[in-house]
Amino acid sequence: MRPLLLTTTVLTLLLLPSWAGAQWSIGPSVVISIPTADFSNVSGVGGGFGVKAVRELKMGFGLRGDFAYLSHGKEFQSISTISGVFPAEVRHQSFRLAAGGQYMLHVAEGFNLYASALGGFYWFRTNINLNTAVGFFQLEGRSEAALGWNFGGGFQYDFGLGPLLDIGLEYQTIYNISSEFEIRDPSGEVIGTEKRDITANEFLIKVGVTFFLGKQ
């Protein structure tokens, strides 16, 4: 429950009236997800978009909220129905809402370094496009929610067009994600499947821009 409590508290503080000297920054970005270990059996490399809001308080510390949408590619499967077996296009998607703290170091004019630690909600959904003998259908498969953490850092650079270029790298841990693994015999042939919960880990690469608002 700690990620849930952290997310709720930070989002509440972000929405309170501005304190004297507080400054806001908003940063849209392109997000790339690279799953590791067991998570690579559940999710492929993903891509999407995200946005972060930071409320800088004092001495470089601030409150931060993040949202991201990712699509984890598509695969083709054969799905059995009462009318027979038909080809289907399966797409995996995820939505993330996290909040926490950030520390920013102003290294030089137009160049900043930052580090963050966030916790929050992670929702995974599977969409299925099914072609059958009687028509085309869109179905929603497995859908599940989980809690997790991430930490990381990055830099911001003024490239002369107003907003700062913002590049970040995060390592994310998500708890209790349901997954299905193949069971193979000694010769390597698949003889069945096994379902179990895993702790999912992934790297996130974020490339975007940051706009600073409010007091300097």
Image (tube, helix red, strand yellow):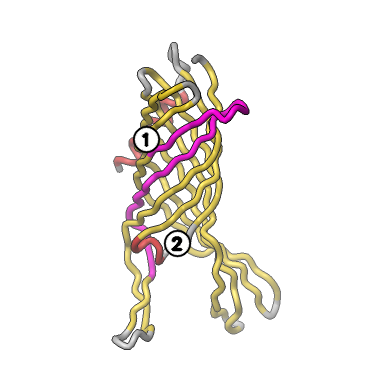
Q: Earlier in the sequence, mark 2 or mark 1?
A: 2
The residue drawn where x is 53% and y is 53% is: 47
Measured from the top left, where is residue 185 in percent x and y? 31, 85
Q: Quadrant of residue 159?
A: top right
- Residue drawn at x 35%, y 54% is 201
Quarter of the rendering containing residue 21: top left
The residue beneath circle 1 is 116
Q: Position of residue 202 (x, y in %)?
A: 39, 53
Q: Residue furthest bottom?
A: 187
Bin the neighbour count of mark 1 within 10 Å (Cα to Cα): few under 14, some 14-19, many 20 and up.
Answer: many
Name the secondary structure under disc 2. Answer: loop
Please identify the quadrant where the N terminus is shown: top left
Residue extent of the magenta highlight: 153-180
Q: Is residue 167 magenta?
A: yes
Three-letter code, disc 1: Ser
Q: Say which quarter of the image contains residue 6.
A: top left
Q: Is residue 121 magenta?
A: no
Residue 129, compared with residue 207, is above or below; it is below
Secondary element under disc 1, as helix, strand or loop, is strand
Report the amino acid beneath label 2. Answer: Ser
Image coordinates for residue 111, horizontal then vertical, percent: 47, 27
Which residue matches tag 2?
43
Side (left or right) of 80 relative to 117: right
In the rendered view, tell whether residue 74 sits above or below residue 86.
Answer: above
What residue is rendered at 62% in x and 28% in y? 161
Q: CA distance from mark 2 to mark 1?
A: 24 Å
Between 87 and 133, the residue placed more toward the observer is 87
Residue 192 percent across, percent down from the top left: 37, 81
